[in-house]
Amino acid sequence: MNRRTYLVTVGSTVSGLSVGLAGCEGAPGAGVEETDTDGEESPSPTAEPTETGTDPDAGTETDTAAGTAGQVPNTVEMVTEGSDYYFTPLGLYVEPGETITWINESGSHSSTAYAESLDAASVTRIPEGAEPWNSGVLSEAGATFEHTFEETGTYDYFCIPHAALGMVGRLVVGEPGGPATEGQPPNGELPSSEAIVEQGAISYDEFAN
């Protein structure tokens, strides 16, 4: 199920109304040609034909999951900013089969699934049958990690070095589902699955403030 199907949108149709204006004989401007100051009639302006645009991209909308202005869709930044350690977008929606890339912007971080099959996690908060992931700690600025998500549902994850400081994140793939829809992860608070689906992406600053 894609985001458009999951969300209920109510469209409104606006009908244009054409109003005919009836001119009265003798009324100012009714049926009278515009004249120059010398008394000669000026020809009525002829409307130039309008060319219909043929650009296939014109007037179309594109759904993206960008969390912050200018950010590439399907990327999550891992940030150290003073005493703050966070993922942004904190919540992100993608379709099944899409790949997410984590980028280490500053500091040293990991992207690690809440899955008991991993030594670092004590609980499981990813859908049943989903493949867990663990980037390991990325210390170099600009280092990246990618993971492709096939199973629909809600995925919670965390940063190994900063879990105790509340560095957690949430993904919704296709539609909410699984154990992560129940309550919050053990190391922090996250936006609801429904809010993530509705907004597409929720930045750290947006949620924190």
Image (spheres, helix red, strand yellow):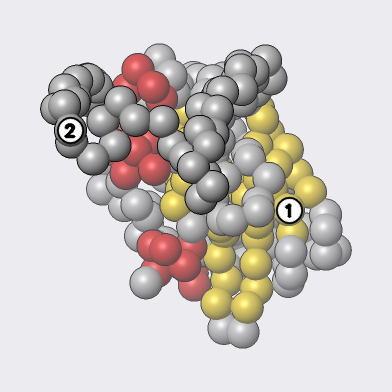
Q: Name the spot of residue 138 as percent of width and height, x first.
A: 78, 58
Residue placed at 43% from the left, 19% from the top? 2
Q: How crowded is mark 1: few (under 14 residues within 10 Å), some or many (20 or more)?
A: many
| Residue, far bottom | 82
Residue placed at 65% from the left, 67% from the top? 79
- 162 horizontally vs 140: left or right: left
| Residue, far front | 39
Q: In which quarter of the image is residue 3?
A: top left
Amino acid carrying mark 1 in the image: Ile
Instruction: Residue 103: give its label.
Output: 1
Q: In which quarter of the image is the N terminus?
A: top left
Q: Residues within 10 Å of mark 2 (few under 14, many from 20)?
A: few
Amino acid carrying mark 2 in the image: Gly
Can you identify the residue that label 2 sits on?
Answer: 26
Q: Name the spot of residue 161 as percent of width and height, x first.
A: 63, 66
From the viewer's side, name the closer residue of 111 and 206.
206
- 148 horizontally vs 183: left or right: right
Query: In what element is the residue under mark 1?
Result: strand
Above/below status of 5 relative to 93? above
Q: Name the spot of residue 104 as percent of width and height, x first.
A: 74, 59
Q: In which quarter of the image is the C terminus?
A: bottom left
Residue placed at 74% from the left, 69% from the top? 106
- 139 horizontally vs 22: left or right: right
Q: Compute the Cα span from label 1 to label 2.
A: 75 Å
- 72 horizontally vs 180: left or right: right
